[in-house]
Image (tube, rainbow, N blue to C red):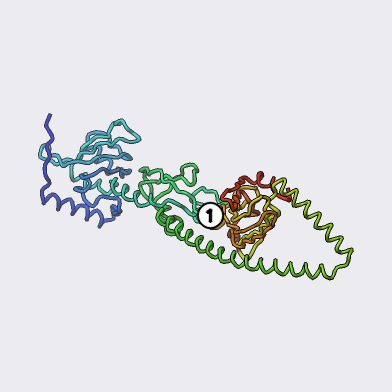
Amino acid sequence: MTELKHNHRKPLAAYISLIIVLLLSATGLSAQQPWNFPSLEEACLGDAYLVVLPSDLRGAACEAAGQPVKDGLSYHISGPYRRHGVDYIRFQQLPGDSWPLVAGADFKVPEALAVRMLPHLVSHSYWQRRYSQISQWAYVDPSKVAGLLEVDTTDHLRGRYLTLLWLGYQFQSSDESPVYFTVSVEGSAPQRLSLRAVERLAEWGAFITYADRQAYLRSDQELRRQLESRQDDLQRRIDSLSSLVTLMERQDDSMAVALQDDSSAWERQRSRAEVERTKARMDREQIFLMSIQPARSNQMFGLELNLYNCFPKTIVKVEVDITPYNERSRVQEDRFGRSVRTVRCMGPIPPGSPARYTFDELFWAEGTAIKFMRVTAIIFHLADGTTRSYTGYNNIMKHSLDR
């Protein structure tokens, strides 16, 4: 058996290969694509996928190889190897879907015929680079992929991007491209996309990268910080107005006492007795939540909270977790992805005293499915340094006047 020996390509052979490729392109026999090899030398440096050959070219390859030539497989291309004065190019099948080797998956053809086959070879390294670029897209806008991807576009998903998982790509002959990409959206079943479909979605701005998502989250955090700063300023104004209202109420009470007759005084005394009995019951049963009134200002959801100090120590500060829900009583994010807000109610609140707090801008209302809000956690900070904590809506409502 004659041993195959590697022969370094001569400059003249390189020029001949280049002229043949240029002639093929000029006659319209093939269209150069970015995933094709620019020269046979480049093809012999890597791996390639052999797409379906035309019948005349397939016949010539089979005759030269002395066996059937299998297209639709991935090959390692090497050479040239000189034998009997002729340079040959070897095609060896790579491990893949059709592994182990099938008949006709390892063959040699003359170099001139390999040059004719060059437009039908697809570079593996090109698609590896291409896949590395597009796999950086980590999220997809469901409103922009309707008709191309099967995704859930119900109301509770609008306004947010869905997680996009790239599962890989597979070579397959196509008019659009020789590969199909496999993707999964938010845990859905794998779906196939051609290169043309991927590029179309990219042009529509349907994808964002992980880095872009992080930048968006940082912007959202800054917005939250600004809103919290405005909330603190608003709380100080509310406290000032509450003090003024309290002073006016005391003055009104003094004037009423001076003007009311004995009957009115008796009624007032009875009302005070009822108030004292109510306060005694609230102290005994540790009822600290008098009422919760939802409010809406412009495009924001707010809340009015009325508390009562049922503890023997003065309340210094109260921390309250507010959670929004949709019509199915499930936790619902607002437009900025917020599903809980922690507000602070500053004291002091003496024992046996009520306090009212109003929060105007808790959750964004426009374009969301939020229907109502609940207090899901509350922490009382007492003057002696101790705390009283209550979690869970049902548990907190046991300490409500409206239970």
Pick the residue in front: 343 or 333.
343
Q: Residue at x 65, y 54 (%)?
A: 371
Pick the residue in front: 179 or 143.
143
Q: Residue at x 46, y 45 (%)?
A: 184
Element class at badge 1: loop
User: Which residue is the site of mark 1?
Assistant: 337
**Res 205 visible:** no
**Res 35 visible:** yes
Pick the residue in front: 99 or 214.
214
Pick the residue in front: 165 or 361.
361
Q: Position of residue 155 (x, y in %)?
A: 59, 53
Q: Position of residue 168 (x, y in %)?
A: 38, 43
Q: Residue at x 10, y 40 (%)?
A: 85
Relative to residue 151, is residue 279 drawn left or right? right
Which corner quadrant of the image does residue 204 belong to? bottom left
Relative to residue 123, is residue 295 drawn left or right? right
Q: Is residue 44 above or below residue 202?
A: above
Q: Position of residue 186 (x, y in %)?
A: 49, 46
Q: Position of residue 277 (x, y in %)?
A: 78, 51
Which corner quadrant of the image does residue 235 belong to? bottom right
Which corner quadrant of the image does residue 240 belong to? bottom right
Q: Residues within 10 Å of mark 1 (few under 14, many from 20)?
A: some
The amino acid sitting under disc 1 is: Gly
Q: Quadrant of the N terminus?
A: top left
